Image: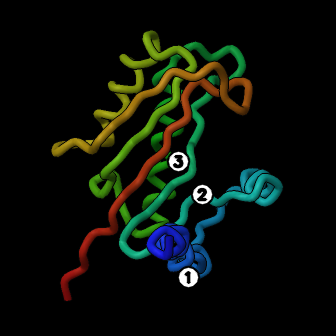
């Protein structure tokens, strides 16, 4: 019986060790005043840097009124991601994981692959593409989430 009584403490211990990680992390809020208002209202940041890892919040690619070219929407999103990575001290070369959430995976994949290949070069990062029903905002077609590792600085 004593053996099992210790089990919950073991399961809780790892979480307790990480309770203050976000307080020690570098939090990057948007440099865009409108986006910053949404971040503050909803309680999230453009990115969080902890240790040598950069976690970006999802960036939504969306079509503007009257726009039909998916590549334009993706290019804007990839440019925004690049700027956030730069503010964090990283670049597209440091990306290790991409997760994309698509409202129409089959029709969107050719366009996002074409744009991604302008920004992401070999060796490729891991990438998971997922079909979803909808995104916020309503004009959103794909949300792109990135994880990067900060480059090692030799000095």
Q: Give whichever of discs 2 and 3 has the lower sequence position.
A: 2
| Label whose residue precedes the other's in the sequence (3 or 1) | 1
Q: Which residue is mark 2?
A: 46
The span from disc 1 to disc 2 (Cα, nearest Å) is 16 Å
Residue in the foreground of this view, choosing between 14 and 52: 14
Up the image or down, 59 lies above or below 140; here it is below
Q: What residue is shown at x 63% (from left), y 19% (from top)?
A: 133
Q: Secondary structure at mark 2?
A: loop
* Secondary structure at numbered mark 3: helix
Give the side of residue 36 with respect to residue 126, left or right.
Answer: right
Return the residue at label 1: 24
Q: Residue 12: where, in percent of width, then height?
A: 55, 71
- How far is disc 2 from disc 3 in space, using C-alphas? 10 Å
Camera-nearest residue between 137 and 87: 137
Q: Say what secondary structure mark 1 lies in.
A: helix
Label 1 neighbour load within 10 Å: few <14, some 14-19, many 20+? few
In three-dimensional space, the C-alpha distance between marks 3 and 1, rounded to whole angstroms, equals 25 Å
Viewer-closest of 92 and 55: 55
Q: Residue furthest top?
A: 107
CB of mark 3 within 8 Å of CB of mark 1?
Answer: no
Give the x, y percent position of residue 10: 47, 73
Q: Nearer the viewer, residue 69 or 130?
A: 130
| Rendered view: 110 above or below 46 | above
| 147 left or right, relative to 28 | left
Residue at the image point whose x is 16% and y is 45% from the top: 123
User: Which residue is label 3 attached to?
Assistant: 80
Mark toward the viewer: 1 or 2: 1
Question: Residue sitting at 36 percent across and 17 percent down?
Answer: 110
Q: Is residue 154 shown above or below 149?
A: below
Measured as percent of width and height from the top left, residue 35 is found at 72, 51
């Amino acid at each position: 019986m004593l053996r099992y009584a210790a089990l919950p403490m073991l399961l809780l211990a790892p979480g307790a060790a990480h309770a203050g990680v976000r307080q020690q992390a570098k939090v990057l809020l948007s440099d865009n005043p409108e986006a910053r208002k949404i971040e503050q209202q909803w309680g999230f940041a453009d990115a969080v840097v902890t240790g040598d890892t950069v976690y970006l919040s999802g960036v939504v690619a969306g079509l503007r009124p009257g726009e039909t070219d998916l590549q334009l929407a993706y290019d804007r999103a990839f440019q925004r991601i690049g700027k956030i990575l730069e503010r964090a001290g990283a670049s597209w070369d440091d990306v290790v994981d991409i997760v994309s959430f698509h409202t129409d995976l089959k029709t969107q994949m050719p366009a996002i692959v074409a744009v991604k290949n302008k920004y992401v070069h070999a060796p490729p990062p891991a990438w998971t593409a997922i079909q979803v029903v909808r995104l916020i905002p309503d004009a959103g077609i794909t949300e792109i989430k990135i994880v990067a590792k900060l480059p090692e600085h030799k000095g």
